[in-house]
Image (spheres, rainbow, N blue to C red):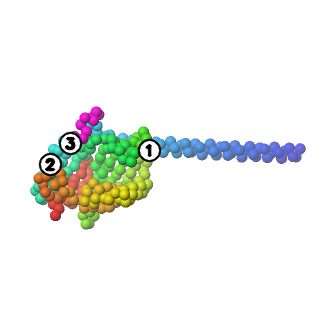
Amino acid sequence: MIMCNKDNKDTNKKLKVRKKRKFKKRYWLLIDLALAIIVLYLLFYKPARYKPLDIDPAGNNQDQISPYLSNVLLPQLHNGAQRQEPFDLVVIQKGINEAIARLQWPKESNGVLLSAPTVFFVPENIVLMGTASIKGAELVVTIVTKPTLDEQGLLNLRVEKIKIGAMNITPLARLLAKRMYAERVESVPVDLQNLRAKIAASLLNEEPFEPVINVNDIFDDVDEKVRIEKITITQKKLTLRMVPAS
C-alpha cells in the first residue's frame, strides 16, 4: 500500500513536470511569434510622410530635363558663377523632388531594385526616402544625413540614421557600408577628382572632401569653379553659400 502511494506521487510529479515544460514551450513560442510579428510590422511600416511624386504613371516624361533644373536651379548657378562673387544657390524641396522623379526609375544595385525616391529638407538635415524591392518584398528605406563643413572648409555628409520601415539599423548599416566601400576601392580604383566618387566616399566611409564644383563641366561658356562656403537647411529649403574657388 505504501509502495502504491509512492508510485502515484511520482507519477503525479512527472505529469506536473511535463505540463510545466509544455507550458514553457508554448509560452516561448508565443513570445517568438509576437516578436516576429513586431519585427515584420516594423520592417514593412510605411511612414505617413512618404508620398513620392509621380510625374507620369506611364513614364513618358522620365529622363527629360526638369523645368525646375533648366529654368531655376541651373540659371542660378550659371549667373552666380559668371559674376565671380559670392552668391546663394537656393534649392527648394518641391523642385528637387520634381527633378528626381523625372529620372529613370527603378534602378538596380546589387540585386536590389530602388525606386520612388523623395527628399525632405528639415532643419540641419537632409532626409532621403525610397522603396527597396528585395525578392518581391517592398521596404521603405530612410536615410538621414547631416552635411557639415569643418574648419578647413571640407564637407562631410555624415549619415545620422538609417531605417528600414520603422526599424533603426544605423550601426549595422554603417558597418556594412564601410565594408562595401573598402571592397569596391580594392577592386576598382577611385577617381578622387570625380565629385560623385567624393560624395560616395563621404556617405559610405565618412571621408570629408573639398566641396568645389567645376562649373565648366555643366556650362561650356563658364570657365569657373565655385566652392560651397556655408550650408543652411531649413524646412523645405536648402541654401548653399557659393564663393569663387581659385
Can see residue 33? yes
Q: Marks 2 and 3, how far apart in space?
A: 14 Å
Magenta region: 56-66
User: Could you tell me if the residues under marks 2 and 3 are in contact, i.e. CB atoms within 8 Å?
Assistant: no
Instruction: Give the residue at x 41% y 55%.
Output: 176
Is residue 120 within the magenta segment? no
Which mark sits nearer the N-terminus, 1 or 2? 1
Name the residue carrying label 3: 65
Is residue 60 within the magenta segment? yes
Mark 3: amino acid: Ile
Q: Residues within 10 Å of mark 1 (few under 14, many from 20)?
A: some
Q: Marks 1 and 3, how far apart in space?
A: 35 Å
Name the residue carrying label 2: 75
Q: Nearer the viewer, mark 1 or mark 2?
A: 2
208 vs 21, left or right, is: left
Name the residue carrying label 1: 43
Instruction: Give the residue at x 28% y 39%.
Output: 53
